[in-house]
Image: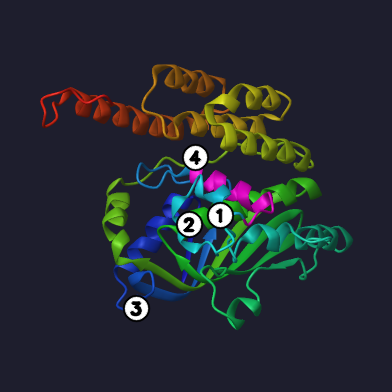
Amino acid sequence: MYLKAATLDDLMAKVFEKLLKSKVRLRATKGDNVEISGVALELTQPRARLSRTEVKGTLFSCLGEFLWYVSCSNSSKQIEYYISRYQEFAETDGTIWGAYGPRIFGGDRSQYEIVLQTLRDKPTSRQAVIQLFDRQDIESPHKDVPCTCTLQFLQRKGVLNLVAHMRSNDAYWGLPHDVFAFTMIQEIIANELGYKLGSYKHLVGSLHLYDSSRKDVGAFLNEGVQVTSAMPSMSPGRQWPDINIVFAQEALLRSKGPDGVEAALEAAAHLTPFWADMVRLLAIYALTKGSRGEPDRLRQVVKLQNEMSSPYYRTYIRKRTRVVERRFEQLNLIASEPNESGDRIDA
C-alpha cells in the first residue's frame, strides 16, 4: 500500500481512514489493535512535519523527543519531562534500552558522522544508512526495543531524500513523533552538505491503531482539512554550533524550570532565528509545565510568543496557554467550593 501527501495531517488522515477499515485484528501487550502491513508513506514536504490540528498538534513533546535523540541521551528522566509514559519502558538503572540517541549519535565515530562522510566522499552512495534495530534487541527481553530498523539518506540531483524503514509503528502516537524527528535530522544533514530538502518516505512492516486511540482518531478526522503550513527553514550551513547551545538551555530549563528562563533567553539571542525559536518554545514549556495559571507566567508566555521569529508556532503556544488557563479555572472552582467541614479549600 502506498499513501502520499504534502503534509503530515493529510498523510495521517489517509492512514487513519485505511486503518479504521482494516479487518486484521491483533492482540498485543499494549492492547488490542487493527493492522495494515507493508505500507509505504511519502511526505513530499518534510517541513510540514507537524500536525496543525487541535487533537494532534503536539509540538512540545515532538521537540523534547527530538532533542533527547540528538543529545545522545538514554536517560528516562530527560524524556519523561516531555512524555511521561516513557517511565513504563525504563530499565532498573533508569535508562531506556531502545533509545535512538546513542545508536545514531553515540560512539567514538557515530553512525551519523559516518553517513555525513559517506555522502561527502560519494554523494550518490547507497550506503548512507543508519541502523537502529540490532540483533541484541531480540537476544534477550527488554522493556523497549527500537521500532525503527534503518534510516537511509539518498542524494539525487542536489536533493537529499530520506527513507525510514520501521518494523512496527503506532499510527496515532508513534508516527507523528517519528516523522518530526527524522525529517529534522534530514534537514540538518541537507543543510550541512549544501543540498535541498527532498521527500521523506516512511516504510512500515506493521502499521497499527490501538482500540484505545479510536475515539481520538475520530476527533482528528472530524476536524477536517487543515491549512497547508510548514515549519520555517533552518539557516544554510552547519547547525551543530546552534544545536549545542540549545542542548545546554534545554538542560537548564528542565532542571530550573521558570527560574532558568532569563538565562536561556539570553543565550538564545546569539542563535539563528530557527534555533532561537526552539529555545523560546522550551522556555514556554517550562513556564507552563505544572503552572496553576499564575498571571506573571502567562504574561511571560505572551511576551515570548510576540518575540518568536516566525508566527508559525502561535497555534501551539495558544493551545498550551489554553491548557494552563483551564487548569486555573478548575482550581478556582475547587477553591470556591466548601469542603465537608464548611471551610473553603485553599487551592
| Observer able to see residue 206 | yes
Q: Is residue 126 left or right of residue 36?
A: right
Q: CA distance from mark 4 to mark 3?
A: 35 Å
Alpha carbon separation for disc pair 1 and 2: 6 Å
| Residue that carries the numbered disc 4 in the rendered image | 229
Query: Closer to us: mark 2 or mark 3?
Result: 2
Mark 1: amino acid: Ser
Q: Main secondary structure of the magenta part?
A: helix
* Residues at discs 4 and 3 in contact (Cβ within 8 Å): no
Choose the circle earlier in sequence order: 2 or 3: 3
Name the residue tied to disc 1: 76
Question: CB under 8 Å between callouts 1 and 3?
Answer: no
How far, Cα to Cα, is label 2 from label 3?
Answer: 25 Å
- Residue for point 59% across, 60% down: 95
Q: For residue 271, which quarter of the picture? A: top right
Q: Which residue is mark 3?
A: 26
Say whether marks 1 and 4 touch (CB < 8 Å): no
Residue 97: image tag: none
> In the image as oriented, which residue stretches furthest toward the right?
121
Nearer to us: label 1 or label 4: 1
| Residue at position x 51%, y 18% in the image | 303
Residue 36 among those drawn in magenta = no
The secondary element bearing badge 1 is classed as: helix
Q: CA distance from mark 1 to mark 4?
A: 32 Å
In this view, 79 is above or below 305: below
